[in-house]
Amino acid sequence: MTALDEERRHAERCRAGLRGMLDAARENVIVGETVAGDRYSAERLGRHLKSLAEELGEEPDGPPFFGRLDFGAGSADHAGRTYHIGRRHVGGERGGPPLVIDWRAPVSRAFYRAGARDPLGVAVRRRFGWAGTVLTGYEDERLGRGEEERAGRILTAEIERPRVGPMRDIVATIQPEQDDLVRAGLEESICVQGAPGTGKTAVGLHRAAYLLYAHRRRLRRGGVLVLGPNRAFLGYVSAVLPALGEVDVEQTTLDELLATVPVRAGDTPDAAAVKHDARMARVLREALYGRIRKPVEPLAVPDGSARWRVGEDELRRVVDDTRRDGLPYATARERVRARVVELVRRQAEARGRSATAAWLRGVGRAVTPFLDAVWPAVRPEEVLYEVLSGRAHAPSLTGAEREAIVWARPPRGFRGARWSAADLVLLDELAGLIERPRGYGHVIVDEAQDLSPMQCRAVARRSGHGSLTVLGDLAQGTTPWAAASWPERMALLGKPEARVVALTAGFRVPAEVVEVANRLLGTLKADVPVTRAHRAGGRLRVRAAGDLAAGLVAAVREALGFEGSVGVIAADPAAGALEEALRAAGLEPDERLAVLPASLAKGLEFDHAVVCEPGDIARSGERGPNLLYVALTRAVSRLDIVHAGPLPVELDLGGGAGM
Ligand SMILES: Nc1ncnc2c1ncn2[C@@H]1O[C@H](COP(=O)(O)OP(=O)(O)OP(=O)(O)O)[C@@H](O)[C@H]1O
């Protein structure tokens, strides 16, 4: 029997093992539903077992392993042992050693980190090649003998494979510098700066999976949140975690997370700029705390025939002390109540009254009118209504800034207000001042360069007791408030101490395309390290067309002749008409062909990208050049630039690469 046959037999054993685990999990779901003592535990147990069954059932026939480690005699803990490494653990037969070790287990680390210089006890590292469910071959590196092949055939094939459908996991080929980030401890917040295609998103998602494995108990309580820039992006990446067996991660956009009321209005660019500025935090805080009044009279609490009295000075002290405690507004209101009740209790007890729980509750209720006058209960909408109606003082803003945000015609009351997307961020800030929001154990924020200071604060509120993985690229900042420096953003995100790490090896964009995109870097106002493309062999074409739509149709027809996905990217106002032109030519968008406005291209990738009229994209606002940089860096294999108007000077290739 050849070594490959042996491996195939092992794969069969693993599949049988997986099927056994799946059957047992399903059986347990049924048993769990009938045996649990009460409804609550039945539900919890059922949910747990179902997610286990789902997790195992996700890909029962997929490759059960992708690598193998043979430890040499010199290894301290694993001498002479062999382990297959896969997406999930497969238990051994009859209590024997496991058939597959989870890629996140401590021993699997050597698979990603061992090298010829430091083999970590590994004699041979084997990487398997699969075509669908068939094991087709393997590559060995005899690390013990100093052999090491970083960019072997299997990694190259993985990077160059055509992209159709959603993003896939990269567990088989995680690189050492990526592994370092994936396995960073739960306590550590990190910020990853990386040029397009350096694997930031991949690293973030694998870090989520790793943390859930290594700290499952702690994270089950807090949870893990993944924030992406938009729905299209989430649609592209959201299958990665379930494929890795993690079905319980919340993946959403910040806008959706904050959507407590519907967005029914827009903002002028000036208004949005002010609303997203960090100074709004102060404006809102002052507007909220401006509702607190100084007690101006003593409080009398009736108690049967008696009356207890708390003096004005004492009440003032209570309010002032409570303000200094720095609690959320609503919690502080209750603290004031509790303190006043305590003052009454002391008086009453000094006069021989015994304070029962019911009596204390009664006193607490009697204090409410005083609280309503001095520390009124309030909703976020009421405070923002006051600010946007121009009734708040807002000394931190200039006159022009105040004017930019106040409503031209304020609604009659806060219930009639039409809120904008930026208002939702402000409402969240207020809600966070009033009551602490739900926090997460770990939050992963992708495309974080685009977050405004106020949005950063919304993220910080949810990760105060947890940690953060922040992913982004300063050169791809396309919002008016995009970040200019990571340390400054990390401070706004509440983690000023976070390590900032740069990834510089690109796994998506071929060298020819990177070279052209990098010409824009000089104009992007971003100080970022340059990327090394991991792959060559890409194709770049510039097509000058008399008629843009006709040029696009020709480019797309040709692109569809290749394998893989095709993405057409155009300036936002032009995208709709170009999509129509493609339809009219019989080129209907489907799962292989997508037409997108440049503002939605972020984070996506296509085998073949067609960028239409780059000059229009570059001129679409102050951040146009950044938007063009994003558009030019979506291609995995081929990039076509189609233009009828003049090209931006940086892209004027002087006929060299043109056609
Ligand atoms: N180690 C790896 N092995 C194989 N493929 C990889 C590896 N790292 C990244 N990739 C692939 O490279 C592509 C780009 O990765 P990803 O989308 O995570 O990059 P990014 O840095 O987030 O890009 P962008 O800045 O454009 O959002 C993806 O297809 C990803 O699967």
Image: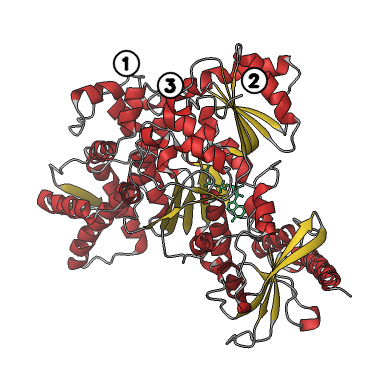
Q: Residue at x 74, y 71 (%)?
A: 90
Circle 3 residue: 619
Disc 3 secondary structure class: loop
Which quadrant holds residue 34? Answer: bottom right
Among all residues in the image, which is located at the extreme right? Answer: 1
Residue 215 horizontal/vertical position (percent): 53, 68
Which quadrant holds residue 406? Answer: top left
Residue 26 horizontal/vertical position (percent): 79, 63
> Badge 2: how crowded within 10 Å, few (<14), some, or many (20+)?
many
Q: Is residue 340 above or below residue 449?
A: below
Q: Nearer the viewer, residue 446 or 455?
A: 446
Label 3 beta carbon less than 8 Å to ligand 1: no
Dot 1 or dot 2, earlier in sequence: 1
Q: Nearer the viewer, mark 1 or mark 2?
A: 2
Disc 1 secondary structure class: loop
On residue 552, which mark appears? 2
> Badge 3: how crowded within 10 Å, few (<14), some, or many (20+)?
some
Q: Residue at x 42, y 39 (%)?
A: 475
Circle 1 residue: 408
Q: Nearer the viewer, residue 224 or 628?
A: 628
Q: Residue at x 48, y 28 (%)?
A: 651
Could you tell me how far apart the alpha carbons at marks 3 and 2 are, in whole angstroms?
20 Å
Q: Nearer the viewer, residue 273 or 148?
A: 148
Could you tell me how far apart the alpha carbons at marks 1 and 2 are, in whole angstroms?
44 Å
Q: Residue at x 21, y 38 (%)?
A: 290
Could you tell me how far apart the alpha carbons at marks 1 and 3 are, in whole angstroms?
30 Å
Q: Are marks 3 and 2 in contact (CB under 8 Å)?
A: no
Dot 1 or dot 3, earlier in sequence: 1
